[in-house]
Image: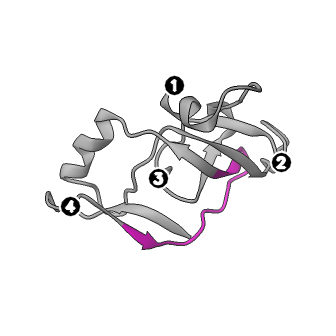
């Protein structure tokens, strides 16, 4: 899958790369990301990223794999979430305690920005 990864270089702080699709743990849902927002904390972390860290803490999208433990939204539910990292990608695992279903009429772009 494609993801934006940190480069550690000021002239090009992120770049698209092929990375392995994440595998959710028991209390996590796999979300197909439709939108993400860039927040100030992440831009600071891009200046000197930890090895292996990928940006992305505010996302909105569609649950494509529900949590194995039965918690959280079902497959095909539109959600907004706050994963610990990795949301600037096609897919991200999000703890179900950090997910909320989107109401009708709220688009993914606005939801990710909230």
As measured in the structure, the alpha-carbon distance from the residue carrying label 3 to the one carrying label 1 is 16 Å
* Residue under label 4: 8
> Label 4's element?
loop
Residue 32's x, y, as percent? 66, 54
Q: Which mark is residue 75?
A: 2
Q: Decide if residue 6 is on the left or right side of residue 68.
A: left
First in sequence, mark 2 or 3: give its number. Answer: 2
| Label 1–label 4 contact, CB within 8 A | no
| Label 2–label 3 contact, CB within 8 A | no
First in sequence, mark 3 or 4: give its number. Answer: 4
Badge 4 local density, few (<14 within 10 Å), some, or many (20+)? some
- Residue stretch in magenta: 16-32
Q: Is residue 10 above or below residue 56?
A: below
As measured in the structure, the alpha-carbon distance from the residue carrying label 2 to the one carrying label 4 is 36 Å
> Label 2's element?
loop
Q: How many marks?
A: 4
Q: Is residue 75 above or below residue 12?
A: above
Going 55% across and 44% down the picture, which residue do you hit?
Answer: 35
First in sequence, mark 1 or 2: give its number. Answer: 2
> Label 3's element?
loop
First in sequence, mark 2 or 4: give its number. Answer: 4
* Residue under label 1: 114
Q: Specify the quadrant of the image occupied by residue 53.
A: bottom left
> Label 1's element?
loop
Residue 60's x, y, as percent? 60, 40
* Residue 23 lies within the magenta run: yes
Residue 13's x, y, as percent? 24, 58
Of tags 1 and 4, the one toward the viewer is 1
Camera-side residue of 1 and 67: 1
* Residue 38 lies within the magenta run: no
Going 81% across and 51% down the picture, which residue do you hit?
Answer: 68
As measured in the structure, the alpha-carbon distance from the residue carrying label 2 to the one carrying label 3 is 21 Å
């Amino acid at each position: 899958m494609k993801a934006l990864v940190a480069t550690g270089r000021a002239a090009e702080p992120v770049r698209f790369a092929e990375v392995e699709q994440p595998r959710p743990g028991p209390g996590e849902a796999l979300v197909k990301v439709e939108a993400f927002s860039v927040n100030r904390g992440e831009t600071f972390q891009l200046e000197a990223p930890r090895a292996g860290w990928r940006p992305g803490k505010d996302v909105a999208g569609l649950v494509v794999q529900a949590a194995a433990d039965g918690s959280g939204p079902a497959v095909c539910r539109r959600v907004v979430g706050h994963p610990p990292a990795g949301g600037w990608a096609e897919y991200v695992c999000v703890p179900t305690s950090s997910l909320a279903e989107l109401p009708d009429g709220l688009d993914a772009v606005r939801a990710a920005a909230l």
